[in-house]
């Protein structure tokens, strides 16, 4: 069975903390996600997202604070807009914008963090491996 | 009487007649039979008629050609020329041609933006604006020169020059000053945008009279009979530079609710407006724009007590 | 600055459909400022094209380079080594840069990745508006610093027209009437009587209408 490879860009103040909390709470969630910590979701750049896909990720998501609670005030708004821009670009490229998502959550939402991980893993499992590495997976 | 042109309209205005002008919208095809039909219908009820020049930037039979057809029916045409579609070279050429065919009145307009019409991808010209056009036509007549300064050696075109004024556009305080600019440039008669807001029009005329503009140019009040509530609503919402007060629409609605014919109410309203503007100082006539309802003009003229029309000679 | 926007991705991909290796050339001038063709946009476009072509089973090799400007020959010359062995050059410069590349590298196919839109400036983060009509004879002192050639949809010099209402141009509620702006500004400056002065017809030969233009500083030529 195909195991999705998903990269999760998480902001230090909320998403990454939520990940820590999920860990402390001993929550079980899909092991398919690789977390990358960022000071703020607003530091996400289209190039990094594209690089993740070009290097073989099946799915990517960016997780930032709840709207209004960003430690850097508007970082999460910028991140959301950039992610939507790249989603459109992924449609144009032919890879599909559904493989990319943006989420908001707070540091206290350990359960939500696990939920998102499972949600995204399921979505990507249904979409199948990224066509950019389809040949690689075909034999598995 | 010192007339500047051979225009019949100028003669009547100079004589102190309260003039009536109408407007004909040419067809979107190459036959003049409708124009001729309208000309024959309006002939005895108006002193002159405008022919629009691709109004709202929709391609129609040209004002120039339509004017010639109308002239042949014995009705005095007022040719319209916008700045949107022609440069100064084409304008002057058309003016020489129009004059040679007997046209004597010209209304100089900026022109609606082409995005309103059926050719929004066309290039717009605006080589001149309406005030520069007015001045160019005046200099052709009085200084006998082309726009470039070269003399017109003989047979200069001698147009009776008209312009539009819009008391309902902004900035309001500047509207009268801009009218003065047009008159300074050479405008001799003015036709206003359609009046439904009498109060604002009165204020405009007060300011114009205060500056003595009514003694330098003949101001004709623009009016339109409303045929339906839909037509009124459309003008209120979609036509830039027009004001249709809510009371007007309510009046039509009330008429409809009382089982009256809305169009008849519209005609009565128009006649009332004519009677009101006649009382305002500085108003030298009315300009009835019954586009797509030209047939109603004789009725309006009669109901307003303006029939029969005076003879020019 | 010159403000440009990227063409739809499919259009650009179409231009290089038959290429195996391309140079994607950005510009650090105006297009970088308006986020259309700077270093970031260049790398994004190159990555997007690579990924798109891999999906099609027809891989594309890309080389990226961001010139200081593409409208100066010395900066265009600097690309010579990179241009040598590519099938095409995708330029993210404005129309000027594309032409400079095409003229310098005559045997290479140079394609534009942008649509050059207008000359203007920023009004807010991510938003640019047209301001200058490049008419060759500036009269901004007469109009309170508001250009009537480009900000008035009809380029009136004796405006406003009868379609100006509530401060808006007749073409759209989102477009302010330039002449309302001019009126307000000149009134605030106490110079309203300037607007009563007749402005004669413009000499359009100084603008685009006179043909392609040239400017020379004799004291700067060698």
Image (cartoon, coloured by chain):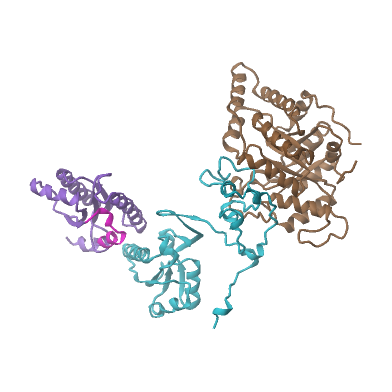
Q: In this view, does C160 lie to the left or right of A44?
A: right
Instruction: Name the main secondary structure of what is drawn in magenta.
Output: helix
Q: Which residue is drawn at 56% across and 35% down?
A: B237
- Note the chain letter of the purple one: A
Residue B96 appears in the rendering: no
- Asked if residue B203 is positioned above or below residue C3 in the image, the reply reads above
* Residue A96 position within the rendered picture, expressed as x and y whole percent measured from the top left: 31, 54
**Residue A47 lies in the magenta-colored region:** yes
Q: Give the range drawn in magenta.
A: A39-52
Q: Is residue B65 left or right of residue A36?
A: right
| Foreground of the two, B189 or B7 | B189
**Residue B189 lies in the magenta-colored region:** no
Q: Is residue A9 left or right of residue A91?
A: left
Chain C: give its colour.
Answer: cyan
Residue that protrudes farthest toward the top in the picture: B258
- Note the chain letter of the brown one: B
- Asked if residue A119 is positioned above or below residue C47 in the image, the reply reads above
| Foreground of the two, A14 or B114 | A14
* Residue C9 position within the rendered picture, expressed as x and y whole percent measured from the top left: 40, 60
* Residue B54 position within the rendered picture, expressed as x and y whole percent measured from the top left: 68, 46
In the rendered image, which quarter contains the C terminus of chain B?
Answer: top right
Q: Would you identify the image quadrant in which residue B151 lies?
A: bottom right
């Amino acid at each position: 069975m195909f195991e999705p490879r998903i990269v999760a860009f998480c902001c230090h103040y909320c998403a990454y903390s939520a990940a820590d909390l999920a860990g402390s709470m001993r929550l079980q969630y899909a092991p398919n996600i690789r977390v990358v910590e960022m000071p703020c979701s607003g530091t996400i750049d289209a190039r990094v997202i594209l690089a993740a896909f070009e290097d073989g990720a099946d799915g990517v998501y960016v997780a930032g604070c709840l709207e209004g609670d960003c430690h850097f005030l508007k970082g999460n708004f910028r991140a959301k807009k950039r992610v939507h821009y790249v989603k459109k670009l992924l449609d144009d490229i032919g890879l599909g914008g559904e493989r990319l998502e943006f989420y908001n959550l707070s540091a206290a939402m350990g359960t939500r963090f696990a939920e998102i991980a499972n949600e995204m893993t399921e979505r990507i499992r249904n979409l199948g491996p990224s066509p950019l590495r389809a040949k690689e997976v075909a034999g598995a | 009487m010192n007339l500047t042109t051979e225009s019949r309209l100028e003669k009547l205005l100079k004589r102190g007649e309260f003039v009536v002008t109408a407007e004909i919208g040419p067809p979107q095809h190459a036959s003049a039979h409708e124009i001729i039909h309208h000309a024959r219908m309006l002939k005895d009820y108006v002193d002159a008629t405008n022919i629009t020049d691709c109004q709202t930037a929709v391609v129609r039979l040209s004002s120039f050609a339509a004017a010639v057809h109308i002239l042949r029916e014995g009705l005095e045409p007022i040719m319209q020329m916008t700045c949107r579609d022609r440069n100064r070279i084409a304008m002057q050429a058309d003016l020489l041609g129009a004059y040679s065919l007997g046209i004597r009145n010209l209304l100089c307009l900026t022109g609606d933006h082409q995005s309103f019409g059926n050719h929004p991808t066309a290039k717009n010209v605006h080589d001149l604006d309406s005030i520069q056009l007015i001045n160019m036509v005046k200099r052709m007549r009085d200084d006998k020169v082309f726009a470039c300064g070269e003399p017109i050696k003989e047979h200069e075109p001698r147009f009776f020059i008209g312009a539009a004024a819009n008391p309902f556009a902004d900035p309001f305080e500047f509207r009268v000053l801009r009218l003065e600019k047009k008159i300074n440039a050479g405008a001799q008669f003015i036709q206003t945008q359609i009046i439904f807001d009498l109060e604002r029009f009165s204020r405009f005329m007060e300011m114009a009279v205060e500056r003595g503009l009514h003694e330098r140019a003949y101001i004709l009040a623009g009016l339109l009979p409303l045929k339906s509530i839909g037509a009124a609503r459309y003008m209120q919402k979609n036509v830039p530079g027009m004001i249709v007060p809510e009371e007007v629409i309510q009046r039509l609605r009330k008429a409809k609710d009382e089982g009256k014919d809305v169009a008849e109410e519209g005609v009565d309203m128009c006649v009332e407006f004519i009677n009101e503007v006649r009382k305002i100082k500085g108003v030298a006539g009315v300009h009835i724009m019954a586009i797509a309802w030209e047939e109603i003009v004789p009725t309006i003229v009669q109901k307003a007590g303006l029939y029969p029309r005076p003879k020019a000679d | 600055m010159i403000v440009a926007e990227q063409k739809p991705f499919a259009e650009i991909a179409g231009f290089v459909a038959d290429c195996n290796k391309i140079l994607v050339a950005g510009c650090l001038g105006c297009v970088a400022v308006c986020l259309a063709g700077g270093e970031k946009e260049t790398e994004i476009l190159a990555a997007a094209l690579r990924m798109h072509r891999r999906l099609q089973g027809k891989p594309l090799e890309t080389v990226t380079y961001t010139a200081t400007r593409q409208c100066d020959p010395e900066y265009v010359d600097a690309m010579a080594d990179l241009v040598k062995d590519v099938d095409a050059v995708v330029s993210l410069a404005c129309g000027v840069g594309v032409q400079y590349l095409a003229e310098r590298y005559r045997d290479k196919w140079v394609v534009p990745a942008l649509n050059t839109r207008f000359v203007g400036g920023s009004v807010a983060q991510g938003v640019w508006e047209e301001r200058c009509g490049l008419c060759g004879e500036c009269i901004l002192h007469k109009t309170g610093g508001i250009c009537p050639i480009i900000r008035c949809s009809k380029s009136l010099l004796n405006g406003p027209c009868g379609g100006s209402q509530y401060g808006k141009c007749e073409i759209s509620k989102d477009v302010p009437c330039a002449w309302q702006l001019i009126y307000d500004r000149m009134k605030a400056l106490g110079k309203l009587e300037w607007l009563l002065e007749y402005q004669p017809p413009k000499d359009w030969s100084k603008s685009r209408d006179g043909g392609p233009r040239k400017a020379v500083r004799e004291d700067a030529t060698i």
